[in-house]
Amino acid sequence: MNSNLHTHSTFCDGAGTPEEMVVSALERGFATLGFSSHSDMVADLAAYKAEIRRLKEMYAGRMRILCGIEAEYDTGFERGDLDYVIGSTHYITAPDGARFAFDNTPKELADGIRDHFRGDSAAFVRAYYAQEREMVLGYDCDIVGHLDLVRKFNAKHPYFDETAGWYREELVKTADAVAESGKIVEVNTGAISRGWLDDAYPSPEFRALLRERGVRFVLTSDAHSPAAIDCAFDRFASAERYVDLCFMRSTLADN
């Protein structure tokens, strides 16, 4: 694959500057690189946009560079003149009103389930997917980010059964919602580069459910460092039929 639309840099929690990410992508033969800083981490949005525009002009003719954002669903975000928006959920709001990040560390996740879901892992997972369905049906985003992020720690710190019937029901309901929304789902290899999974988001089973419903995919690395810009792309490039970027919003086709 010669594109990646999920790229982080030093404007949020990434380890490389935007230009270092561009250089890495060029070395790997990329034709398109899209930046997607976390909306709730960018201290100066104007400076972020200006830097990506500078790189777009500097590398014109060598690579198409796009300026997007990874928007945190429950905080809201105005797309403005951004090229695209990835809608993601990294926080969950519990029945008691508490909001906590569930993908920082296994301990934070376990503490959150214990303190705010009475230790009921299934209740937490159901709440996560309910929030994902709200996002895909009601949020102005182009791409759905890491759709089953709740799996991140489950391989090394198991806390729910991914083969359980109730879990498959959540996947089916969520796949139905995504199909209804018409949004694109990323096949995200970020958990591989960070050492948590030997698999992409969504899982093969989840992707099959989405594929059956005609959902389109785009391959992304969720790169937080230059070295991870094409993590496992050789493995996942042929796993699905990925959408041509020209079929996305006109802002992408015009760049």
Image: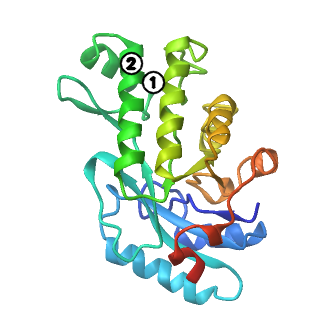
The residue carrying pointer 1 sits among few (fewer than 14), some (14 to 19) or many (20 or more) residues within 10 Å by Cα, namely: some
Number of the label disc, if any, that sits on residue 106: 1
Is the residue 252 above or below the residue 120 in the image?
A: below
Say which quarter of the image contains residue 226.
Answer: bottom right
* Left or right of 201, for residue 120: left
Where in the figure is residue 31, as x and y percent of width and height? Answer: 72, 73
Callout 1: helix, strand or loop? helix
Instruction: Name the residue: 33% across, 74% down.
Output: 80
- Quick one: 160 or 216, which is closer to the camera? 216
- Quick one: 129 or 49, which is closer to the camera? 129
Instruction: Name the residue: 51% across, 59% down.
Output: 8
Quick one: which residue is furthest to the left in this view? 96
Cα distance, mark 1 to mark 2?
6 Å
Where in the figure is residue 247, as x and y percent of width and height? Answer: 62, 68
- Quick one: 93 or 27, which is closer to the camera? 93
Callout 2: helix, strand or loop? helix
Q: Quick check: can you spot residue 115?
A: yes
Disc tally is 2
The residue carrying pointer 2 sits among few (fewer than 14), some (14 to 19) or many (20 or more) residues within 10 Å by Cα, namely: some
Where in the figure is residue 171, as x and y percent of width and height? Answer: 53, 28
Residue indicated by mark 2: 110
Q: Quick check: can you spot residue 255?
A: no
Instruction: Name the residue: 64% across, 31% down.
Output: 197
Is the residue 85 above or below the residue 176 in the image?
A: below
Mark 1 near mark 2, Cβ–Cβ under 8 Å? yes
